[in-house]
Image (cartoon, rainbow, N blue to C red):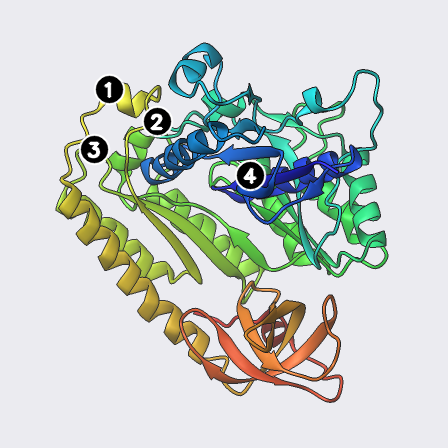
Amino acid sequence: MPGYYIWTVGCQMNKAESERIGSYLEQLGYQPRESAGEADLVVVNSCVVRQSAESRVVHKLDALRSLKNSCREVTVAVTGCLVDSNVDLLRQSFPHVDHFFKPGELPRWVAPQGTETVPALPRHPSASTFVPIIQGCNNFCSYCIVPYRRDREKSRPMAEVVCEVNELVRRGVKEVILLGQNVDSYGHDLPGSPDLADLLAELDGTDGLARVRFLTSHPKDMSLKLIEAVARLGKVCEDISLPVQSGDDEILKAMRRGYTVEHYRQLIAGIRRRIPGIALSTDVIVGFPAETEQQFEGTVSLLSELRFDTVHVAAYSPRPGTFAAREFRDDVPRAVKRERLNRIEQLQKKVVAEINARLLGRTVEVLVEGKKKGKWQGRTRGGKLVFFSSDGDLPGQVVNVSIEKTGPWSLQGSIESRNVNLDKEEKWGTVSR
C-alpha cells in the first residue's frame, strides 16, 4: 500500500486540516508513515504568519529537494498559508514540488476520477479534537497575511457541524474545540444568520459530549449573547482566547484592530463579572513599527493589571503583501524586540505562577487526554495542564484530581478515589485574580 507523511507547522487550524488530509488519504488506501523518507506522498502544511514559521517551511522544502532527487519516486505537495494565488511564482521557487493546493482544501488530485469518499473526519480522534467551523477572515489587520491566503470568511452550515460532532462523539471524542481565524464571526454569511452562541447551544445538548471550547475570538466581535452562552451552557468551558495585541491605542490603530485599550479593559471586566473564575488567554505583538518604549510599557501595564492565564507573545515580522509591510518601516531593532518579548515572558511566568499557586490543595475536574513520561495528563475546564498517577485506563474520562504541586506551566496531583461535588471555581480549574 502507498504511504503518506504530513509535516505540519502553525496554528490549530493547520493541525485540524492535516488530520482531515490524513483521513482522506487513508480512505483512498494510503497508510501513514513515520518519516518523509518512508512515504510515497509527502504533504507540507505550511504557515507564513511569522518569519520564523516561513523559514521553517522553506528549510523543510529544501530538505525535500534531495529526497525528490533520489532514485525512489515520491510526490511532494504543499498546502497551508504559503499557497497564494500566484502558484506560478511558487513553482519557480520550488520546482521540485509536484502540487500546490489551498489551505482548507483536500488533495483531490490523488483520487482516481469518479472516486467517492465520505467526509474527511479525523480517522483516530483523540479525547479532544479540533473542529473547524469558519474559514478565512474579513478583518484585514495591518500585520496579518491570513485574509490574503485563506480568503474571506465562509461559515460551515450549522447542521453540518452538528452532524460532524455527533459522529466524533460516536467515535469516542469527549471534547471539541471549534476553530476559526475569527470564530466570533461564525454564521453571519449563512441563511438566517445563526451565530456562535446558537451553535454552542445546539452542541450543548449532544449526548456523550463532555466539553466544548472555541477559538480564536476578536475583541470587537465578542457579543454579550456569546458571553451569556458561555456563562449559561453547562458543556461550554469557561475558557476564552481574546487577543489584545497591544496596550497602546496608537499602535492598535496602526494595527487596524478596531478597538481601544479601554474598550478591551471594559470587555474583560464584563466577562469576569458574568463568568467568575473565567480562564482568559491573549496574544501580544511586540516591536510593531514605530512602537516606542512608552507604548510598550502600556502593554506591560495592561498585562500586569488584567492578569491572564496565558499570554502568547511574538515579535513583529513584516509579511509581504500586508498593509503594514507596504506602509510602515520595520524600525524597531531586533535586539529591542527580543528584550521586550523576554520581559513579557518573565512577567507572565510570575503572574501565572501566582494564579496557579491558589489551586494548591483544591480539587479540579480533568479530562484525561493520554500519558506522558509515565503520568496521565489532561486539562481542567479552564485549560490548565494537570499531571497525575493512576493504574486505571483513563483516556477520555473526566476525573477529579487533588492538586498537590503547582508551577507556571502545569499542575500535579493525585486522582480522587471518590466523586467530589466541586464548586464552580474548583471545577473550572482557575481562581479569581
| Separation (CA) of disc 3 from disc 1 | 10 Å
* Residue 295 vertical placement versus 171 (above, below): above
Sequence-earlier tag: 3 or 1: 3
Sequence-earlier tag: 3 or 4: 4
Mark 1 near mark 2, Cβ–Cβ under 8 Å? yes
In what element is the residue under mark 2? loop
Residue 117 left/right relative to 234: right
Residue 232 left/right relative to 320: right
| Residue 299 spot, x, y in % from top left | 27, 50
| Separation (CA) of disc 1 from disc 2 | 9 Å
In-front residue for pair 210/275: 210
Q: Which residue is mark 2?
A: 142
In what element is the residue under mark 1? helix
Camera-side mark, 1 or 4: 4
In what element is the residue under mark 3? loop
Question: Which numbered circle lies on residue 289?
Answer: 3
Residue 347 left/right relative to 147: left
- For the point 41% across and 60% down, the residue is 308
Which residue type does callout 3 highlight? Pro
| Residue 93 spot, x, y in % from top left | 38, 18
Q: Which residue is mark 1?
A: 327
Q: How many neighbours does mark 1 have within 10 angstroms: few (below 14), some (14-19), or many (20 or more)?
A: few
* Residue 420 vertical placement versus 365 (above, below): below
- For the point 79% across and 16% down, the residue is 113
| Residue 72 spot, x, y in % from top left | 56, 31
Question: Which numbered circle lies on residue 14?
Answer: 4
Q: Is residue 255 visible?
A: yes
| Separation (CA) of disc 1 from disc 4 | 29 Å
- For the point 79% across and 49% down, the residue is 168
| Separation (CA) of disc 2 from disc 3 | 11 Å
Which residue type does callout 2 highlight? Ser
Residue 214 left/right relative to 300: right
